[in-house]
Image (cartoon, coloured by chain):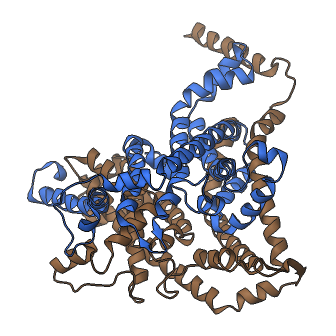
Chain colours: A blue, B brown
Amino acid sequence: METQRISFGLFFRHFLILIILIVFLFPIYWMITTSFKSSEDILTRPPKFVFEPTLDNYRFAFEEADFTKFIRNTIIVAGLSTILVVTFGSIASYSFARWNPGDGHIMFFILTTRMMPAIAVIMPFFLIFRDLGKTDIGNRFYLGLDQPGALVVAYTVFNLPFAIWLMHSFFQDIPMELEDSARLDGYSRLQVFFRVVLPLAAPGIAVTAIFSLLFAWNEFLFAFVLTRDDARTITVGVSSFQTQQGILWGPLTAAAVVCVVPMLVVALFLQRYMVRGLTFGAVRG
Amino acid sequence: MSTNSAVYQADSDLKQTARAAPKKQLISDTVYSVLLIAPALVLILFFALIPLGYAINVSFRFADLTSPRGVDNYVGLENYHFVLNDDFFWEAAQRTLFFAVIAVAVEMIAGVAIAFLLHEMRWFKGITRSLIILPLAASPVAVGLIWRNMYHPDFGVYNYLVSLLGISEQNWLGDPDLAMYSVIIFDVWQWTPFVILITLAGLQALPKEPFEAAQLDGASTWRVLRTLTFPMLTPVLTLVFVLRTIDAIRLYDAVFSLTSGGPGTTTEVLTYYLYRTGLRFFRMDRASAMALLFLYVTVVFTGLVMRRFMRNIAARTRQMAS
């Protein structure tokens, strides 16, 4: 075959890919190096590629701007909403894959709610949580404005449709015969789900969980509108370095690194499943 | 031979009897299946229908949260009338369309081309694929702010890099003629990897036989692409196109962090205008009317293009269940 031969074309192709890779990775490289520059080194002309690294920006972000709190909030909110999404999403998705209640219409309705632009529902969400915060239940579950519960609920609602569609393809891959023979062996429907189906769908559930985490971690608009200070998350924290007096580039870049790098690591491990996750389970990578 | 088939016969008889007379169940399969979807559905319905109902209600009222009247009397279709005659609204809609068409076109062409290049790679394929998808995982707001620094007219790295290429320095985000293109470049950086990744998966899933046959027949590369590769890739490319378009129309984070809609209103897309009307000027009535129009267009678009895709999945389920 032609592609088997080592030729000039083959080398040229790899060289081209290398250039493309550099273009795509350069902003990430620039972000990471800038975060270690002193504030003088950031504002130079021409920009410095070689410099004396310092941790001042990180020190500022964590000591002056209370970035620890933002990270803690993000972990709580993203973690809890992921648990809820996986719990409710997996049983619903299994039901759709096995019995298809509503003959596709309910599942399609669920998908359309995911297509809603967040900005179109953000104002009613704001008012719902403002009112929930004044009730007893709302107080008990921290569902008011600037409380983590409100974000947990918002992210759960927004990620559920995605989770149901993604897991659907994994549940469909499990042969029906396995379930049937488990039933013949005397398992109840619940036992079939927990002992036969769930272990086999474990990769799908893991992928869904990690994607829910990724979305919640990177989400900005809900966090921006529904929180003010106590429940503020990491993305809003990064943008808060744009102050009235100007942009604090050093601390902002350090904060951006703290926000972005963990998710880059997640993506590297998730690589195998990215395709399936990004297409709602429609394309198998 | 005959004993074997007799055993199979007996076995399938046994299975059939078992199926015909299942153990006594308190609830039927139908009720069980509905119970399983209930928690998710209740949550989604509650948080989809209440905001919808609220928005519909407010869109027919006067609602200015900065005035003492607050949410006030019904005004009929006045808000819709206002929005549909609002020049800012139509300009924002035009900008949204412009952004979506250019960004998605560039991403599709570049993404498919790079995917073909990657597919034919012999060394470092796995690591390249892992590295090239990294922009996808980065929070758009956080990296958007980094790009804002890189675009800076005085000490930004991009002006330095283009000056090395002999191009004059630009005011990337401050020049009204250039700002929208700078936002598009950012979006292309973040989302081309998505097109690459999915197209590559589609390419790798192609069956080998037709291509080997075409090679034996001595078909030209172009002919193979036109008659085999692209037709077989169409479903995957359609899905990528639809998902990218939906996301491009909803663009918000990048505009927020890069330009805040400026300079002037040159990068103010619909979502950003909506945000400004509702959460900066607190005209909830007009914002709600706008949000509903926007929602209607997106859902109709999604409905039209995703329906076929959804039907396929439903058909597969039915096939398996029978």
State the residue at coordinates (81%, 60%): B50
Whole-percent x, y for residue B181 in the image? 39, 80
Specify the quadrant that holds the C terminus of chain A. top left
Whole-percent x, y for residue A21 in the image? 25, 58
State the residue at coordinates (20%, 62%): A19
Q: Is residue B170 above or below residue B222?
A: below
Q: Is residue B68 above or below residue A136?
A: below
State the residue at coordinates (22%, 54%): A53
Residue A35 in view here:
yes
Does residue A26 appear to the left or right of A283 in the view shown? left
Front residue (pair B225, B141): B141
Whole-percent x, y for residue A151 in the image? 65, 52
Does residue B81 appear to the left or right of A262 in the view shown? right
Front residue (pair A57, B275): A57
Front residue (pair B121, A79): A79
Whole-percent x, y for residue B91 in the image? 58, 88
Q: Residue furthest front?
A: A64
